[in-house]
Image: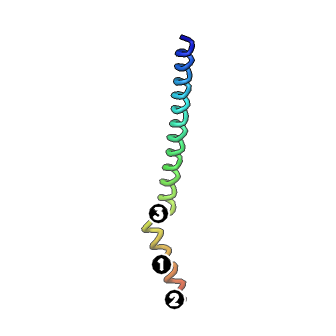
């Protein structure tokens, strides 16, 4: 009976550790999504940034 209880405690500790890691992962993903949304609003999307770079290179190449 002691080993079963001890095993059950180990399993519940492992389950709690997994839940904590899952919470941390979700929190980090939320922060990453917010940072990407802010960067998109501030700097534009990929196509917009590529257009600005190409336009700047053409302008610098003509002068």
Residue 31, percent from left and from top = 53, 46
Mark positioned earlier in the residue sequence (1 or 2): 1
Q: At 51% across and 37% down in the image, what residue appears?
A: 22
Mark positioned earlier in the residue sequence (1 or 3): 3
3D distance between C-alphas at marks 1 and 2: 11 Å
Front one among 29 and 12: 12
Front one among 31 and 24: 24
- Near mark 3 (Cα within 10 A), the count class, few <14, some 14-19 or many ≥20, is few
Residue 38, percent from left and from top = 51, 54
Residue sitting at the far left: 47
Q: Quadrant of the C terminus?
A: bottom right
The vertical placement of 48 against 11, above or below, is: below
Q: At 46% across and 71% down in the image, what residue appears?
A: 50
The vertical placement of 51 against 16, above or below, is: below
What is the number of the mark on residue 62?
2
- Near mark 2 (Cα within 10 A), the count class, few <14, some 14-19 or many ≥20, is few
What is the number of the mark on residue 44?
3
Mark positioned earlier in the residue sequence (3 or 2): 3
Marks 1 and 2 in Cβ contact (< 8 Å): no
3D distance between C-alphas at marks 3 and 2: 26 Å
Residue for badge 1: 55
Q: At 52% across and 24% down in the image, what residue appears?
A: 11
- Near mark 1 (Cα within 10 A), the count class, few <14, some 14-19 or many ≥20, is few
Mark 2, secondary structure of its residue: helix
3D distance between C-alphas at marks 1 and 3: 15 Å
Residue 6, percent from left and from top = 57, 17
Mark 3, secondary structure of its residue: loop
């Amino acid at each position: 009976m002691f080993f079963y209880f001890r095993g059950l405690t180990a399993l519940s500790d492992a389950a709690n550790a997994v839940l904590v890691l899952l919470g941390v992962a979700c929190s980090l993903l939320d922060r990453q999504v917010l940072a990407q949304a802010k960067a998109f609003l501030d700097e534009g999307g990929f196509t917009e940034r590529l257009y600005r770079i190409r336009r700047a290179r053409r302008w610098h190449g003509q002068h």
